[in-house]
């Protein structure tokens, strides 16, 4: 139960990884913040900020993510998996690859009042356009329905040079 008021609550957080990183076989069953009013922070299961390291490969597979909770009113987003190549603290070289395979993410009845979006897999809308993302064989269920709700969200303003999606089960209410 995190009480930070200036940053996201994240179960797994990678910043500028190098080489090949594997995040696998995790059960993230409770993602909770004790902050009663979240205006600038949110809750994320797995966050990958891979900026400035060309050639980095992040494999995210066989994970189960659910159990999001906000103690009060949350005006910031909730994400199961967040992929961001850009980073405010870096510049220059980009070109990471993120592979998202065989994950199950359930956003179901977030406890608390959520007024921002809820997304199973997402990407920042101002990330550079050199990140390659592959999503295969995932089960993404978003039952929130009271706010902007997405199974997968990749804003049009951030074209992904190579985006592959195949055999995913996507459900949103």
Image (cartoon, rainbow, N blue to C red):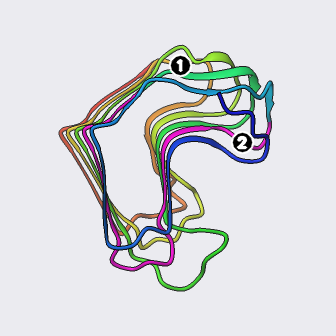
Residue appearing at x 18%, y 39% in the figure: 167
Closer to us: mark 2 or mark 1? 2
Query: Exactly how many numbered labels are in the figure?
Result: 2
Taking the magenta stretch, the answer to whether it contains residue 8 is no
Q: Is residue 124 left or right of residue 136?
A: right
Residue 44 screen position, x and y as percent: 54, 39
- Image: magenta residue range: 39-65
- Please identify the quarter of the rendering in which residue 78 is found: top right
Residue at the spot x=68%, y=33% of the render? 2
Residue 58 on the magenta span: yes
Disc assigned to residue 144: 1
Q: Which is nearer the N-term, disc 2 or disc 1?
A: 2
Provide residue 50's location: percent of width, then percent of height.
Answer: 47, 66
Image: 61 above or below 170: below
* Quadrant placement of the N terminus: top right
Residue in the image at 71% along x and 27% along y: 115
Q: CA distance from mark 2 to mark 1?
A: 19 Å
Does residue 13 lie above or below 38 as drawn?
Answer: below
Q: Secondary structure at mark 2?
A: loop
Residue corresponding to mark 2 = 41
């Amino acid at each position: 139960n995190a009480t930070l008021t200036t940053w996201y609550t994240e179960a797994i957080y990678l910043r500028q990884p190098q080489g090949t990183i594997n995040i696998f076989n995790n059960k993230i069953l409770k993602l909770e913040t004790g902050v009663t009013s979240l205006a600038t922070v949110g809750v994320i299961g797995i966050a990958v900020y891979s900026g400035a390291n060309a050639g980095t490969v992040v494999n995210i597979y066989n994970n189960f993510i659910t159990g999001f909770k906000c103690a009060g009113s949350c005006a910031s987003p909730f994400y199961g998996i967040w992929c961001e190549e850009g980073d405010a603290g870096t510049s220059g070289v980009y070109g990471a690859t993120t592979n998202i395979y065989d994950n199950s993410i359930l956003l179901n009845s977030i406890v608390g009042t959520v007024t921002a979006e809820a997304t199973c897999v997402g990407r920042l809308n101002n990330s550079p356009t050199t990140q390659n993302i592959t999503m295969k064989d995932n089960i993404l269920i978003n039952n929130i329905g009271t706010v902007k709700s997405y199974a997968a969200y990749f804003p049009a303003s951030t074209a992904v040079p190579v985006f592959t999606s195949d055999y995913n089960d996507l459900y949103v209410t």
